[in-house]
Image (cartoon, rainbow, N blue to C red):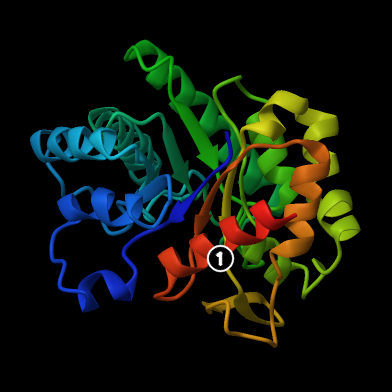
Amino acid sequence: MIKFGPSGNSESFAREGYKHTKEMPEWLSKRNLEIFEYSFGRGILISAETATELGKIAKANNIEITAHAPYFINFAALEQEKIENSYNYILNSVKIEKCFGGNRVVFHSGAQMKQDRDFAFNKVKAGVENTMQKLLDAGYDDVYICPETMGKQGQIGTVQEVIDLCKIHKNIIPCVDFGHVNSLLQGALKTTDDYKRIVLDPIIDQLGYEKARIMHVHFSKIQYGAKGEIKHLTFEDTEYGPEFEPLAVALKEYKLEPYILSESAGTQAEDAAEMKRIFNSL
């Protein structure tokens, strides 16, 4: 089943007087949304006990929680200590995600830095392989980890790089951030054919239909420059894109059922609801 929701808290959540994330599931349920992505971007600051409580509230409101691992992860780091820390960031994110009652953790896999691109990617690949083995050794054989496509030239995470990481294990599925892809490729995602040719067809061809069907999606309009992503925008933007409707057409035609999270700048819930409206209107 395709699901829609916000990544993080919309500005309207606080504007309407809500103060605690425990109130988020009911708030989203009233808006006919189905998922919420909890970000550990600056570190995992929630306890297992609080996460378990939030998970119970989410389940009662038919909201599924996914997680975004800390932004500090870099499997291409020059220092071995940072690579070791990257393992722990994902393992600890998975631990809390299980407390939420969910089974998906998104992560940024690394940055090229001043290294050769292939060399940096091979370090990332080895890091993801080791991470997957550590998860299996810890008994987490029912959790998807989702490497994300990235929007800047110096980051590891082109569509092909993410596909190659997902070939490592059946529990690794792609997180396609279409705003990032569009930014990196200087506005290439315009038509339904663009979405198919650049993203969906390679995923289906190389990873198989099932991984494509259940993939994770981030979507927002993003301002970009010569080196890629600059900042996230809202659906009010008319300059940068990408537009959701051509993607929705492709998802319908291919019968895909991803989780779709809005990463708009402050209007995540509103734009998630708009994506759901567009999808259901086709």
Q: Vertically, is 130 above or below 71?
A: above
Residue 138 x %, y %: 32, 15
Q: Residue at x 56, y 55 (%)?
A: 218
Q: Quadrant of residue 91?
A: top left
Quarter occupied by the N terminus: top right
Residue placed most toward the observer, 270 or 124: 270
In the depicted structure, whether residue 211 falls above or below residue 217: above
In terms of depth relative to the viewer, which is nearer, 96 or 86? 96
The reply, left or right, for residue 125 in relation to residue 210 is left
* Residue 112 visible in the snapshot: no
Identified by mark 1, the residue type is Glu
Relative vertical location of residue 152 with respect to residue 120 in this rendering, above or below:
below
**Residue 178 placement: quadrant:** bottom right
Q: Is residue 180 left or right of residue 47?
A: right
Category of crowding for the residue at label 1, using alpha-carbon neighbours closer than 10 angstroms: few (below 14), some (14–19), many (at least 20)? some
Q: Where 17 falls versus 83 (above or below)?
A: below
Picture coordinates of residue 219 (x, y %)? 58, 61
Residue 15 in sight in this render: yes
Q: Residue at image x 61%, y 40%? A: 258
Which residue lies under the disc numbered 1? 274
Q: Is residue 246 left or right of residue 78?
A: right
Residue at x 64% of width, y 44% of height: 121
- Quarter of the C terminus within the rendering: bottom right
In percent of the image, x 85 and y 50: which residue is there? 196
Q: In the figure, residue 215 lies in which quadrant? A: top right
Camera-side residue of 272 and 75: 272
